[in-house]
Image: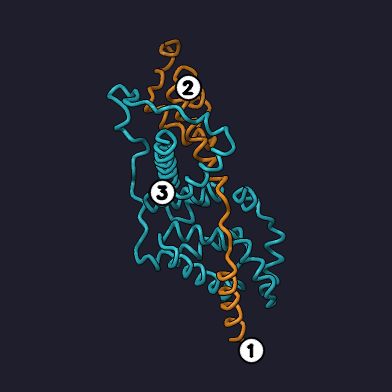
Amino acid sequence: MRFRRRRRALVCRDAVALMGDYLDGRLASRDAARLEAHLADCPHCSEYLAQLRVTIEALGRAEPSVLSDDALEELIGIYRRWRSEFD
Amino acid sequence: MTSAVLASAPVAEDRALLDGLRAGDEHAFVALVRMYQPALLRLAEATVGSHAVAQEVTQDTWLAVLRGVDRFEGRSSLKTWLFRILLNRARSAAGREQRAGRPEAVDDERFDRSGAWVDPPQPWADRVEDRLVAAELAQRARALLADLPDTQRQVLVLRDVEGMPAEEVAELLGITDGNQRVLLHRARARLRGLLALEVTSG
C-alpha cells in the first residue's frame, strides 16, 4: 500500500461511511482523495458507490404523481367553501 | 424531472400566484394546486403511510394555506412553507411525535473485523444503462419507499425525490444536520439493498 506511510489507507467500511457526504459534495478534499484512492483499488466499493448513484437517480426519475380530476375537484370545493365564508 | 423543476421553482411565478390567491382568484389557487399537490401528497404519504389519510392531510394543508396566505412573508420558498404546514398536520394526523433517533451510518454486519466486505455487493449497476431497465427501476424505487422506516423515507423523499437541500430538510423535519445525513445515508443504503435484491433475483 503506497499510502500507508503517509496516512492509513481506508478499509471498505470506512469508505462506505464516507460515500454519503462524497455524493453530496460535502466531503473534505483530503477525505475525498483518500476515498478515491480506495475506490481505484477496490472493485467492490466502486460497485457499491455506482449502485448508490443508480438508486439516487432512480428516485429523481420517478414519475411525478398525477393529480386526479376528483382530487382537484375536492380541493376546488374546499376553496369555494372557504371563499363563501367571506361573502 | 419533477425534482429538478420544483427545486428551481420559479419564484416570480410563485409570487404572482400568491398575489392572485390573496386577491381571491380561483385560477391562482388551481394553478398552485396543480403545481404543488403531487409533491404534497407524496410527502404526506411518506409521513402518514395511508393514502386516504394522506389525501385528508393535503386538504387540511390547503385550507391552512388559504387561511394563512396573508401571513406568508416569503422568507422561505413557497414549497418549503407548504411542506412545513403539511408536516405539522401530518404529524398530528399520525398522532405521534417524530423522533429521529441516532442510527448508525454504516451497517456493520456487512464488514468483518478488519473492515473488509464479508459479502461484497453483486455487480448490477451497469445494467441500468439500459433505458427500459432504468425506467423500471425508477418505478420499483418508488414502490420500495414504503418499506423504509418513516424518518428515513421522509428524508429520502425530500432529498432525492424533491431535490431539496440538506439544511432545509433538516429544518423542516426538526432534526440536526448530523441526523439528516445519517438518515439519508441509511435510507439510500437500504433502498440500494432492496433494489439489489430485485435486480439480481430477476
Question: Who's the residue at 41% across and 48% down the image?
Answer: B152
Q: Are marks 1 and 2 in contact (CB under 8 Å)?
A: no
Residue that badge 2 annotates: A39
Number of labels in the image equals: 3
Amino acid at pointer 2: Leu
Question: Who's the residue at 41% across and 30% down the image?
Answer: A16
Q: Position of residue B139 (x, y in %)?
A: 51, 47
Residue that badge 1 annotates: A87
Q: Position of residue A20 (x, y in %)?
A: 46, 36
In this view, the residue in front, A10 or B47, is B47
Question: Who's the residue at 51% across and 27% down the image?
Answer: A32
Q: CA distance from mark 2 to mark 3?
A: 27 Å
In the rendered image of this protein, which colour is used for chain A?
orange
Would residue B42 be found to the left or right of residue B16 on screen?
left
Q: CA distance from mark 1 to mark 2?
A: 67 Å
In the rendered image of this protein, which colour is used for chain B?
cyan
* For residue B172, above or below residue B192: below
Q: Position of residue B50 (x, y in %)?
A: 41, 62
User: Crowdedness of circle 1 by 10 Å Cα count: few (<14), some, many (20+)?
Assistant: few
Identify the chain of the residue marked 1, using the numbered disc in the image.
Answer: A
